[in-house]
Amino acid sequence: MPNTAPLSGTRDFLALEVLRRNYVISVIEDVYQSYGFEPLQTPALERLDTLLGKYGDEGDQLIFRVLKRGEELDRALAAPDGEALKERLSDAGLRYDLTVPLARVMAEHRNDLPRIYKRYQIQPVYRAERPARGRFREFYQCDVDIVGSTSPVADAEVIGAVAHVLQRLGFRGSEQFLIRLNHRGVLNGLMEVVGIAPVAAGPVLVAIDKLDKIGLDGVRQELIARGLADETAARLLEILGQGLEAGSTPETALDWLDGLLAASAVGRESVANLRAIVPCLANGPAAEHLRIDPFIVRGLSYYTGAIFEIAFPGLSGSGGGGGRYDNLVGMFSGQGIPACGFSLGLERLLLIMEERGMFPERLSGQPQALVTLFDQTTIGPSIALATRLREAGLHVDLYPEPGGYGRQFKYAGQRGIRYALLLSPREIDAGVVAIKDLAGGEQVDVPAGEVAAWLAERL
Amino acid sequence: MPNTAPLSGTRDFLALEVLRRNYVISVIEDVYQSYGFEPLQTPALERLDTLLGKYGDEGDQLIFRVLKRGEELDRALAAPDGEALKERLSDAGLRYDLTVPLARVMAEHRNDLPRIYKRYQIQPVYRAERPARGRFREFYQCDVDIVGSTSPVADAEVIGAVAHVLQRLGFRGSEQFLIRLNHRGVLNGLMEVVGIAPVAAGPVLVAIDKLDKIGLDGVRQELIARGLADETAARLLEILGQGLEAGSTPETALDWLDGLLAASAVGRESVANLRAIVPCLANGPAAEHLRIDPFIVRGLSYYTGAIFEIAFPGLSGSGGGGGRYDNLVGMFSGQGIPACGFSLGLERLLLIMEERGMFPERLSGQPQALVTLFDQTTIGPSIALATRLREAGLHVDLYPEPGGYGRQFKYAGQRGIRYALLLSPREIDAGVVAIKDLAGGEQVDVPAGEVAAWLAERL
């Protein structure tokens, strides 16, 4: 037999999974729209030269490349010469993220877009990763970005919208999610005050980023392993220790940073920027979830300003993150275009919501009743009943084959349909529909004209 | 400058286009759900052997193949040997349609699906066609199928659901769309009664299928060019002429077919099947649009029973089509699994709706008001106002940069936002918000607590 499993790292989504995904996506879309963001969709296929060189060497290796076709493929194969051949075999690749397409769109459609472009984009992306638990080769990204403004209000809008999404999905209070806020310049200032040169900062920041997972001792070991001078490491660890104590409210954390970074110009500016963002979030949905965390780093090297991430207390890893990246969106147009944005981790969210039973019991789109078929003579009346109920806005399945009720009830059970509507000659003659509650087994006759209202009341 | 146009044959969709597409897709989904269909989503990437050999030689050439990666690619390239090398370069391809994935899902998830599986699937598919006007390399298919039943009620449900979709989108009466119904067995019976052997029928059917476009004379020329015997061609053309006259109602058309095909067993059976389907559509959404058209063929060779297609009078080409295909869905499981379905042509629908101005003036998801920023001191009150309105369910943009109103009004205009909300110290002191109607230019002060209600009344 042929292998019919979905390609490794990809998934089939049957009805319940699609409806759950659609529920979460519709909440995200609705909130983003309520914040004035507009949708964008870009193709799954991009020119290969649009994609290459944007995600580092490792990223380039993870791009799914599409084989050239017909004569073009023949030409590419005609003169094989090692490495260069591989590069010639493909002219297009699959979307790897939603940020490079945004940058391309900014260059291509500049004149059709408002001066400040607030867009969201929810589409699958493709990465040729080795599949693992929770790591997929096709997965959705939910990006929201404000392009064209350096204002701290823009950073705050993006953060507020994400907090609003999580609240609407049922995540409540700081026990259920935190928004950790930091600034690239705070990290740069920190390197400055402990005396680590920018060229040497990379590995140190990688170690600091793990503080949450491996603790102070773990970071100490990493720093030593990476060859940081003992004195510098000790000073840094002392600061990390102080920082862990300082951050109970944004105000106390910022006061502490002011003192720490007083000697660094970039540090002072960055704290001032955070001091402009934080009050924009007061009284909004993000307020109770906001923490200044001067030690989150966010891996992507393209961030230039504020950086933020979602944390679910008790769970490792983040639920998404983002920040300000003022030098990226202009990559195709050769202009500096400021931007900040947030990417929510849909797959992670869905997993947590499933584990915690956070989905509504009745998801929009599920069938609500089954019209049964008694025999050949009752097909017409049964179809007419289904048509009336559908016109009344109900979701009504119609069993397509006349015959025993047992098989039809079983089918309703498989589909999670509670009410079976029976219309045999007895009911037709009496002008009623017999409604059987498959959960309890009771059956009542309801006048034919009142079935829609009867069901609507109970669904 | 780099080329920033989307890859040839693919498209970027900016806000208005996404909202229009979402509007049509949401109507399709809503109607399909109201008919008891459940959603399915499958990956864009499929194993290459799942795709190959399912769409004919021409189809195989149009599949986008994904290049192998890393060592696997190196191994494939290590022993180049002409044609076979090409086959070894790829192990996966992009989804070409939604029917083969359905067949794969039926084999893989049989035990998780109800005995009769009513599914819809709305996803993009990929074809390496030469791009042309209206022909894309990435486009959406909207499929709806009932798998597991041979009942004519199933055919009727699929047809009814599609008619209901078109009516909900604003297509009214038989002037705006027709559903043409035919049967593979009617065509086979027709070949039988005019004396054309099954092996010779292919080219004749291709000619007949063009009747609508090229008329009787055109078909005559095609038949002669294809070498059909003069006598046979004359007999066939006589029948086509009669058929064009016979079809004013399903009943007269079926009566005519009964007489015509009386000598063909398969013909008689097929007319009987149509006679079972037609009454299931009476009084439903398809009734006034239904035409028996004994000369539509539908290209796909996999149909085995009823076939149908949407026609828009006055426009050539179809708006989608479908039929019964009882031997296809079992291809991966080795079982015979009956099925019938319909695929709506989303891109065609969108084009016609745009030409005819059939989209709602206000699409769900558009921003409704812009909160302006007067200066640094009013950022807090403006954010608070935006937050309140968003919590009240309104779609509210917030301009992120304080400064002159002129630039902010211009931005609102670019985004199609009618109401600008002004909150300078004057309004704050007075406890009002000044609302400027950018369409007419009037400006009124509205008490701060009544802004949401004021806007809701006017949107």
Image (cartoon, coloured by chain):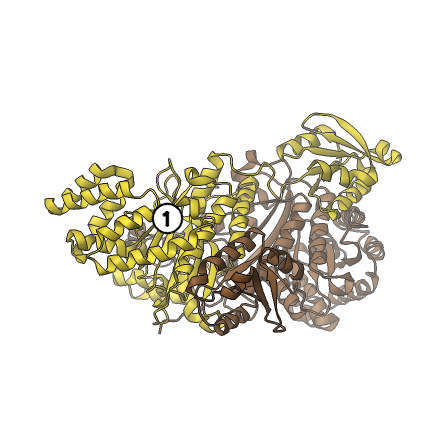
Chain colours: A brown, B yellow
Residue at the left extreme, as displayed:
B230
Q: Which residue is mark 1?
A: B309
A158 to the left or right of A122: right
| Chain letter for the residue marked with disc 1 in the picture | B
Q: Check the image and report above or below for B379 versus A416.
A: above
Left or right: residue B25 versus residue B429 is left
For the point 61% across and 52% down, the residue is A143
The correct choice, above or below, for B24 with respect to A79 in the image is above
User: Which residue occupies 22% across, 45% down?
Assistant: B207
The amino acid marked with disc number 1 is Glu
x and y percentages locating residue B288 in the rendered image: 43, 44
Of residues A120 and A77, the one drawn nearer to the viewer in this rendering: A120
A71 relative to B105 in the view: left or right: left
> Residue B227 appears at what percent x and percent y?
12, 46
The percent coordinates of residue A72 (x first, y second) are 31, 49
Q: Quadrant of the C terminus of chain A?
A: bottom right
* Viewer-side residue, B307 vs B127: B307
- Residue A414 visible, this angle: yes
Q: Is residue A139 visible?
A: no
Question: At numbered mark 1, what does the secondary structure look like: helix, strand or loop?
Answer: strand
Task: Name the quadrant containing residue A241.
Answer: bottom right
